[in-house]
Image (cartoon, rainbow, N blue to C red):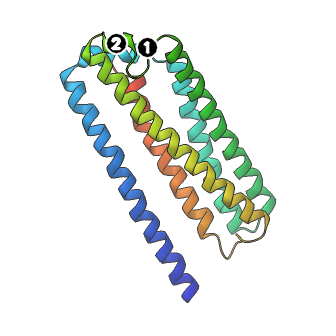
Amino acid sequence: MSTRFDSTGIKIGMWIFLYSEIILFGGLFVLYAVYFYTFPEFFAEGGRELDRVIGSLNTVVLLVSSFSVAASITAIQQGKKKLTIGLLVFSLGCGFIFLINKYIEWGAKFHHGIYPNSERLVDGEPGINIFFGLYYIITGLHGLHVIIGMTLLAISLVLVAKNKITAERFAMLDNSGLYWHLVDLIWIFVFPLFYLVL
């Protein structure tokens, strides 16, 4: 009874934390909407500077990783330890691919002089400067969340390997999965706002 109560309490705490994260990104999306209304043509111009192929690839990578994390939770509930470990390793690999793609994309932007306080942005149109300011803040914050999510998944992986997470006790993996799904959900909003803006 106490174990079930502890598990429920932990899950409620996790949902409250996730709600605070949604408020954080929701505020940033509202800020984006205000500036988009003010500078629609410059936001569209900024969006054309981004690599839609990398953005689309990262979307697919996160969607697949979200599925594999959900599958790992089902696997541990069924007592399939090896499958759980394999699915978590795959999910972590997807996270690394996402971060590598983001590094490549940011590197290309820096190479072309598109970075915060660069001459090209400071001396250019205010709308472009604001677009890329929001781009770096939101995608950078999202990237930090990806790293945190990967850390939680890595900890869960170690605990599964050490039999600390089992079919009877899997709250840590379950909550790590919830966090990872949030990371995926946020990107679903980030991708069209920046890469598909017209």
Q: Quadrant of the C terminus?
A: top left
Label 2 near label 1: C-beta < 8 Å? yes
Dot 1 crowding, Cα within 10 Å, few <14, some 14–19, many 20+: some
Query: Residue, x 75% and y 68% (percent of image)?
Result: 79
As shown in the figure, which amino acid type bears the numbered disc 2? Answer: Glu
In depth, the one of 56 and 101 nearer the eye is 101
- The residue labelled by disc 1 is 49
Q: Position of residue 116 (x, y in %)?
A: 40, 23
Please give left or right for residue 37 compared with residue 144 in the image.
Answer: left
Q: Position of residue 29 (x, y in %)?
A: 31, 38
Q: Position of residue 55 (x, y in %)?
A: 51, 26
Res 129 quadrant in image: top left
As shown in the figure, which amino acid type bears the numbered disc 1? Answer: Glu
Which residue sits furthest bottom?
1
In depth, the one of 12 and 128 nearer the eye is 128
Q: Position of residue 141 (x, y in %)?
A: 45, 40
- The residue labelled by disc 2 is 45
Secondary structure under the numbered disc 2 in the rendered image: helix
Query: Residue, x 49% and y 70% (percent of image)?
Result: 11
Residue 187 showing in the rendered view: no
In depth, the one of 168 and 25 nearer the eye is 25
Q: Separation of disc 1 and disc 2 at Cα?
A: 7 Å
Q: Quadrant of the N terminus?
A: bottom right
Please give left or right for residue 75 compared with residue 66 in the image.
Answer: right
Query: Residue, x 56% and y 28% (percent of image)?
Result: 102
Dot 2 crowding, Cα within 10 Å, few <14, some 14–19, many 20+: some
Res 53 quadrant in image: top right
Please give left or right for residue 68 compared with residue 175 in the image.
Answer: right
